[in-house]
Image (spheres, rainbow, N blue to C red):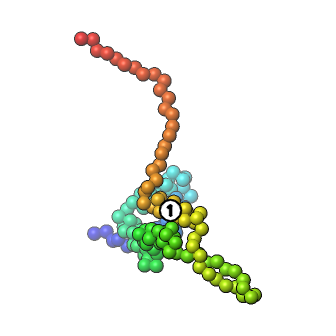
Amino acid sequence: MPSNKLNIKQENFIQNIVKGMSQRQAYKEAYQVNYSDEAIDSKASALFNTDKVQIRYKELIGELESDTIMSAKERMEWLTKVVNGEIKDKDTFWQDGEPVDRDKEARLDTKIKALDTLNKMSGVYVSKIEGNIGVTEIKVELEDD
């Protein structure tokens, strides 16, 4: 039965991908090869799609997902609070030579940005693609009875 353990080059490859490199960059960095880009792309893709690399990739991604990072639902709830005026902005002014902070409601443009982000997150916006299709010739063949 094959081992799920990666060798050093494979581990470096997947670590590089998790750091944000493309598969090509990650492969070049990990394997230090001087192949054509097409050959590297092919090898990198094949390696990335192996079971053991996929398992390790999912492990690393899972480690990045921490309790300290807001879930999509938590982000949506926070943005809703901004729109509803529950999340306050800080306003600093000077009084008797001392800075004084006070809470103030978010500005209208901030609320609009929050609504825009909420709409994008919930899929309210639909991408519309427009274009012209040129038809140069239409053939219709009729059968004789």
Residue 17 at x, y = what percent? Answer: 49, 65
Task: Give the class, few, some or many, for how many residues have Cα within 10 Å of label 1's Cα (few <14, many ≥20).
Answer: some
Of residues 19 and 9, the one nearer the viewer is 19
Q: Residue at point 33% right, 71% down? A: 3
Residue occupying the far top of the picture: 145
Quarter of the figure that contains the N terminus: bottom left
Rendered position, 60 above or below 23: below
Residue 52 at x, y = what percent? Answer: 36, 67
Residue occupying the far right of the picture: 97
Rendered position, 95 above or below 71: below
Observer able to see residue 12 = no
**Number of numbered discs overlaid on the protein picture:** 1
Q: Residue at point 47% right, 62% down? A: 118
Residue 31 at x, y = what percent? Answer: 51, 65
Of residues 82 and 10, the one nearer the viewer is 82
Amino acid type at image mark 1: Leu
Quadrant in which residue 62 is drawn: bottom left
Q: Callout 1: helix, strand or loop?
A: helix
Q: Residue at point 55% right, 52% down? A: 36
Quarter of the figure that contains the C terminus: top left
Observer able to see residue 50 = yes
Residue 127 at x, y = what percent? Answer: 47, 49
Of residues 144 and 26, the one nearer the viewer is 144
Q: Residue at point 57% right, 73% down? A: 105
Residue linked to disc 1: 115
Of residues 120 and 56, the one nearer the viewer is 120
Residue occupying the far left of the picture: 145
